[in-house]
Image (cartoon, rainbow, N blue to C red):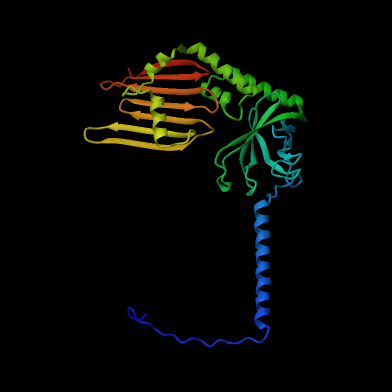
Amino acid sequence: MGAPNTIVNHPVPKRRHAAPGGVVEASQKQRRLLASICKAALILLVTSCGTTPKYPHHSEVPDGPALPIDGEWANNGGLRIRIARGKAYTLNKNTAGTPVGSVLAKDILPLAEGRYACKAESHNFRLLDFGDGEIIVTGSTTLALKSAPNAKTGFTKPVPVSFRKITLDYEERYAAVLSAVLKGLKTNTNLTTLVSMGVLPEYRNSELALEALVAAVDLLKEGWETITEEEYRRNFTAPDGTLLPQLLHDIKQKRRMAKDESLTVGYFPGGETTLTTIKTGESKDGVVELSFSTHGLTYMRKEYPGESVFHEIVTRRGQSSGAAVTTEVFHIHGAIYRLSRVTGL
């Protein structure tokens, strides 16, 4: 490089003169080549954007055992499928243009009464992959096909799709499965399981959802007390007088969190310093979990999707003794049921 303000003269190469017509001919070849490249790129772009991945045809997938859920089913969008010998495949095209006979679930095997494990497609019509899934009997004429999250396809949340019965291959076997599930509900004393079955998306508005909530409320009426909103507020107030769920919702709002995000907060003031921890996370199966901890108090709340159903637990500990009072409540469609217990005496 020359010094500042120094002009450096470089020799200019002599221009070669092309033969007459040579420049025009070369220019035409370049334009034709460029046009060919652009056309190929456009075809590749259109093809890659519009291509539906090739689902395996049901004839290419090995058969499994015959199951009580074998038969024809349809969802609300008009998609008809057949479940037969361990696989589920389409009987008509869906909105994404998936060919008839395409396998949507395979390796279907019994998991528990009324539940079947499977490998299910992951709702990504440009990148096909089969991940963990489940088929769940939800009523006398309904079931749900649920695909688990799949990191490979960017499928982050489980999506259940409900299907209604068209025909069944084994009516009696299916009826026996449903009867066993209903009997299990009536003898189930796990309130969390019953409430979850009553409101989770795969069961929503189904026959089993209604039966599960009825069973849960029957248990609550037997061993829990029904309380007023005022009594609830007395139990679930933070040390500063704020209602505990409102405290956590205010924090979510200030942090501009999504409604379906979970939140855990720890707040521990000391003599000179205060330790505050905040952790966020995704909801699980649509259930938002909120929790708050401070000196002498721990609180947990589950907010179930799409329903006015909540589950809360607060534990308060005395400063001088090891005794603790735990209060647990279920909110179900406007009613509040409470159970309190004392430990550590």
Q: Is residue 195 visible?
A: yes
Q: Is residue 33 above or below residue 238?
A: below
Residue at figure coordinates x 34%, y 79% from the top left: 5
Compare residues 83 and 268 and report the one nearer the observer.
268
The residue lying toward the viewer, choosing from 75 and 196, is 75
Quadrant where the C terminus lies? top left
Q: Residue at x 64, y 24 (%)?
A: 206
Give the image quarter of residue 47: bottom right
Q: Residue at x 53, y 88 (%)?
A: 14
- Asked if residue 310 lies left or right of residue 168, the reply is left
Question: Residue 139: x, y in percent?
Answer: 67, 24
Compared across the picture, whether 82 is left or right of 319 comes to right
Residue 243 appears at what percent x and percent y? Answer: 38, 22
The N terminus lies in quadrant: bottom left
Rendered residue at 61%/23% (across/down): 209
Q: Quadrant of residue 93?
A: top right
> Where is residue 146 drawn, in percent x and y?
62, 35
Q: Is residue 242 above or below residue 14?
A: above
Q: Is residue 166 above or below residue 132?
A: above
Which residue sits furthest left?
272
Q: Quadrant of residue 188?
A: top right
Circle count: 0
Q: Nearer the viewer, residue 53 or 152?
A: 53
